[in-house]
Amino acid sequence: GVVRFRPSGGDTMSKVSSKVSQTAINLKVSARQTNAMQKIFLARSEVEFFGSEPAVYHWAAKERPDYLMFGFTMATVTLIASEALGIPVLGFVLQPTSIPSAAYPPILPLQEATLQKMTQ
Protein backbone atom coordinates (compact mmCIF):
# COMPACT_ATOMS: atom_id res chain seq x y z
CA GLY A 1 0.00 0.00 0.00
CA VAL A 2 0.88 3.65 -0.17
CA VAL A 3 0.05 6.82 1.70
CA ARG A 4 -1.10 9.60 -0.62
CA PHE A 5 -1.16 13.23 0.36
CA ARG A 6 -3.65 15.42 -1.41
CA PRO A 7 -3.76 19.23 -1.11
CA SER A 8 -6.68 20.62 0.84
CA GLY A 9 -6.04 24.37 0.68
CA GLY A 10 -5.21 26.87 3.37
CA ASP A 11 -1.98 28.41 4.57
CA THR A 12 -1.39 27.40 8.18
CA MET A 13 2.06 28.99 8.38
CA SER A 14 0.78 32.43 7.44
CA LYS A 15 -2.00 32.13 10.02
CA VAL A 16 0.21 31.07 12.94
CA SER A 17 2.97 33.50 11.95
CA SER A 18 0.70 36.54 12.07
CA LYS A 19 1.29 39.13 14.77
CA VAL A 20 -2.03 38.36 16.51
CA SER A 21 -1.37 34.62 16.53
CA GLN A 22 2.18 35.01 17.81
CA THR A 23 0.99 37.33 20.59
CA ALA A 24 -1.64 34.80 21.67
CA ILE A 25 0.77 31.84 21.44
CA ASN A 26 3.51 33.56 23.43
CA LEU A 27 1.28 35.17 26.05
CA LYS A 28 2.61 34.29 29.51
CA VAL A 29 -0.31 34.16 31.91
CA SER A 30 -1.56 32.00 34.75
CA ALA A 31 -2.18 28.27 34.24
CA ARG A 32 -5.96 28.78 34.32
CA GLN A 33 -5.77 31.45 31.62
CA THR A 34 -3.38 29.31 29.55
CA ASN A 35 -5.86 26.43 29.74
CA ALA A 36 -8.63 28.74 28.53
CA MET A 37 -6.41 30.03 25.70
CA GLN A 38 -5.66 26.45 24.58
CA LYS A 39 -9.40 25.72 24.47
CA ILE A 40 -9.94 28.81 22.33
CA PHE A 41 -7.16 27.69 19.94
CA LEU A 42 -8.66 24.22 19.62
CA ALA A 43 -12.16 25.60 19.03
CA ARG A 44 -10.82 28.05 16.46
CA SER A 45 -8.99 25.26 14.62
CA GLU A 46 -12.38 23.74 13.79
CA VAL A 47 -13.35 26.97 12.03
CA GLU A 48 -10.00 27.46 10.30
CA PHE A 49 -9.87 23.98 8.75
CA PHE A 50 -13.54 23.52 7.88
CA GLY A 51 -12.99 25.24 4.54
CA SER A 52 -10.88 22.24 3.50
CA GLU A 53 -13.86 19.89 3.65
CA PRO A 54 -14.80 20.14 -0.07
CA ALA A 55 -11.24 19.25 -1.10
CA VAL A 56 -11.06 16.33 1.34
CA TYR A 57 -14.41 15.04 0.11
CA HIS A 58 -13.42 15.48 -3.56
CA TRP A 59 -10.16 13.55 -3.22
CA ALA A 60 -11.73 10.82 -1.08
CA ALA A 61 -14.56 10.34 -3.59
CA LYS A 62 -12.14 10.33 -6.53
CA GLU A 63 -9.42 8.10 -5.02
CA ARG A 64 -11.67 5.80 -2.94
CA PRO A 65 -8.86 4.91 -0.50
CA ASP A 66 -8.96 1.99 1.94
CA TYR A 67 -9.12 4.53 4.76
CA LEU A 68 -8.78 8.26 5.42
CA MET A 69 -6.03 9.45 7.75
CA PHE A 70 -6.19 12.78 9.54
CA GLY A 71 -3.85 14.92 11.60
CA PHE A 72 -4.69 16.69 14.84
CA THR A 73 -6.55 19.67 13.36
CA MET A 74 -8.47 17.87 10.60
CA ALA A 75 -10.46 15.30 12.61
CA THR A 76 -13.92 16.82 12.10
CA VAL A 77 -13.44 17.48 8.41
CA THR A 78 -12.14 13.96 7.79
CA LEU A 79 -14.92 12.36 9.82
CA ILE A 80 -17.52 14.17 7.70
CA ALA A 81 -16.03 12.76 4.48
CA SER A 82 -15.62 9.34 6.09
CA GLU A 83 -19.25 9.15 7.11
CA ALA A 84 -20.59 10.50 3.82
CA LEU A 85 -18.52 8.13 1.68
CA GLY A 86 -18.44 5.11 3.99
CA ILE A 87 -14.63 5.08 4.18
CA PRO A 88 -12.99 4.04 7.48
CA VAL A 89 -10.93 6.67 9.26
CA LEU A 90 -7.64 6.64 11.16
CA GLY A 91 -6.13 9.46 13.22
CA PHE A 92 -2.41 10.24 13.17
CA VAL A 93 -1.74 12.40 16.21
CA LEU A 94 1.82 12.79 17.46
CA GLN A 95 0.77 14.74 20.53
CA PRO A 96 0.89 12.15 23.37
CA THR A 97 -1.14 14.67 25.34
CA SER A 98 -3.31 17.04 23.37
CA ILE A 99 -2.17 20.12 25.25
CA PRO A 100 1.42 19.63 26.48
CA SER A 101 2.20 21.40 29.72
CA ALA A 102 4.23 20.97 32.90
CA ALA A 103 1.09 19.59 34.54
CA TYR A 104 0.58 16.99 31.77
CA PRO A 105 3.98 15.78 30.53
CA PRO A 106 4.07 13.49 27.50
CA ILE A 107 3.53 9.83 28.27
CA LEU A 108 6.38 8.91 25.94
CA PRO A 109 8.51 11.78 24.63
CA LEU A 110 9.32 11.42 20.93
CA GLN A 111 13.09 11.19 20.55
CA GLU A 112 14.78 12.24 17.30
CA ALA A 113 16.34 8.77 16.82
CA THR A 114 12.91 7.16 17.19
CA LEU A 115 11.39 9.55 14.64
CA GLN A 116 14.15 8.74 12.16
CA LYS A 117 13.44 5.00 12.52
CA MET A 118 9.74 5.63 11.96
CA THR A 119 10.33 7.59 8.75
CA GLN A 120 12.88 5.33 7.06
Image (cartoon, rainbow, N blue to C red):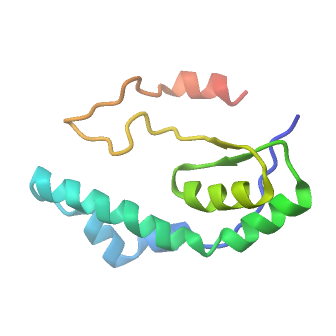
* Rendering coords of residue 4 (x, y %): 81, 49
Where residue 7 sits, quadrant-wise, is bottom right
**Between residues 113 and 12, which one lies in front from this camera angle?**
12
In the figure, is residue 39 to the left or right of 93? Answer: left
In the figure, is residue 95 to the left or right of 24? Answer: right
Q: Quadrant of the C terminus?
A: top right
**Between residues 14 and 36, which one lies in front from this camera angle?**
36
Q: Is residue 119 above or below residue 36?
A: above
In the figure, is residue 53 to the left or right of 50? Answer: right
Q: Residue at x 74, y 61 (%)?
A: 84
Q: Is residue 101 above or below residue 25?
A: above
How many badges with numbers are in the image? 0
Q: Residue at x 65, y 57 (%)?
A: 78
Q: Residue at x 78, y 52 (%)?
A: 86
Residue 119 can be seen, yes or no: yes
Where residue 108 sits, quadrant-wise, is top left
Q: Residue at x 72, y 73 (%)?
A: 54
* Rendering coords of residue 43 (x, y %): 38, 65
**Between residues 89 and 115, which one lies in front from this camera angle?**
89
